[in-house]
Image: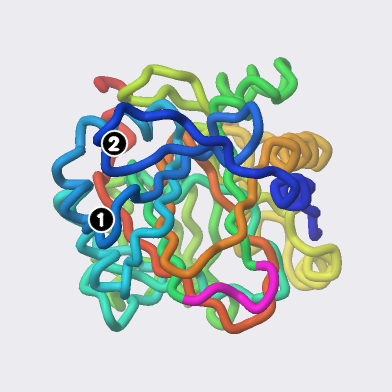
Amino acid sequence: MEPKSPAFSRFRRVEPKPVVLPEGDLVTERFLEDGSTFPLLIEPKVPDLDLAGWAASQLPWLEERVHRHGAILFRGFGVPDVAAFEGFAAAICGELYGEYGDLPHAGDGKKVYNSTPYPPDKTILFHNESSHTPQWPLRQFFFCVQKAAGGGETPIVDCRRIFQMIDPEVRERFARLGLLYVRNFTPGLDVSWQDFFRTDDPALVERICRENDIELEWRGDSLRTRQQAPAVAQHPATGESLFFNQIQLHHVSCMEPEVRRSLAELFSEEELPRNVYYGDGATIPDEVVQHTLDVYWRAAVAAPWEEGDVLMLDNMLVAHARNPYTPPRRIAVAMGRMFRREQLQTA
């Protein structure tokens, strides 16, 4: 299934809207869409402004901006390479997360990854990073090392707006029941359990699952996991309700039709590589997932990348996707401020 992004064509017709700052400030703020406050664009007012150094001196100001807007695009700072990008992300977060199992490490960064190695002609649907796991980053950063020859935008949506736009009955059921993510790690199909858990030791996998409330079942060489997670959450800093999940990356209806048909010929539904259900185990109807897809694309903003751009997201306030592209393209990724699900109860 290849949803189109009307937000991209709309964006290209809109000029950035300036915001007046007090005299003497080192940056300007702009909005990328007329009448919108999402995302925020920050540009330097003076040449050779060091982004990492400036950010380190403006942490409370940046924190307020990212909580208000959800996403900030830093443009025109001349970030030269991945190492400089990593320095900026570390200035914001202090410590970056370097144990992410599904993404390949960028060779020129200590705790920086290359973006998901997914076929360039396919869309990556909207998701909040690691929202289906017990731990996720509150901050996620993207750095455009090389923009694509065509396409390759990173559409983003404000999850507070998604929460308001989704049909109230659909929203209520998601909020009440939560989600159940089911994964079958089958040799030669999708990611292996060894790569996912970053170990060849079944005993260690069992310990990881036990410590994170993940149900586990060995099936010969295969492994099945079942994990409860929220579909709706409250932001730990702002208290706002938001749609927060990875439904679109896991639900069987989001597969391309021919892939879904092929897998259905080989596996029963419970044996598919991945799927997601309501938290009580009931099937989420295809039409419910299609409704959420439509809402996301209506709310999406997809800014064309410029080389040197840095996009900072609050990973709970904002979900991201990826449009198809013509290679080559390289986007580096950094993550920080790791947050555990149980903290939602006490934040």
Dots 1, 2 in contact, CB < 8 A:
no
Q: Tell me the distance, in whole angstroms, between the alpha carbons under discs 1 and 2.
A: 12 Å
- Judge whether residue 323 can be spotted in this image: yes
In which quadrant of the rendered view does residue 289 lie?
top right
In which quadrant of the rendered view does residue 324 lie?
bottom right
Task: State yes or no: residue 112 in magenta.
Answer: no
Range of the magenta residues? 146-151
Please give the name of the residue rendered at 43% of the width and 29% of the height, measured from the top-left corner. Answer: 20
Mark 1 or 2 closer to N-term?
Answer: 1
Please give the name of the residue rendered at 69% of the width and 73% of the height, measured from the top-left corner. Answer: 150
Residue 334 marker: none
- Judge whether residue 203 can be spotted in this image: no
**63, 294: nearer the viewer:** 63
Task: State yes or no: residue 147 in magenta.
Answer: yes
**109, 269: nearer the viewer:** 109
Residue 51 marker: 1
| Label 2 element class | helix
For the N terminus, which image quadrant?
A: bottom right
Q: Is residue 303 left or right of residue 227?
A: right
**319, 346: nearer the viewer:** 319
Please give the name of the residue rendered at 25% of the width and 75% of the height, measured from the top-left corner. Answer: 109
Residue 221 place in picture, x, y as percent:
48, 77
Mark 2 residue type = Leu
Residue 23 place in picture, x, y as percent:
29, 30
Residue 62 marker: 2
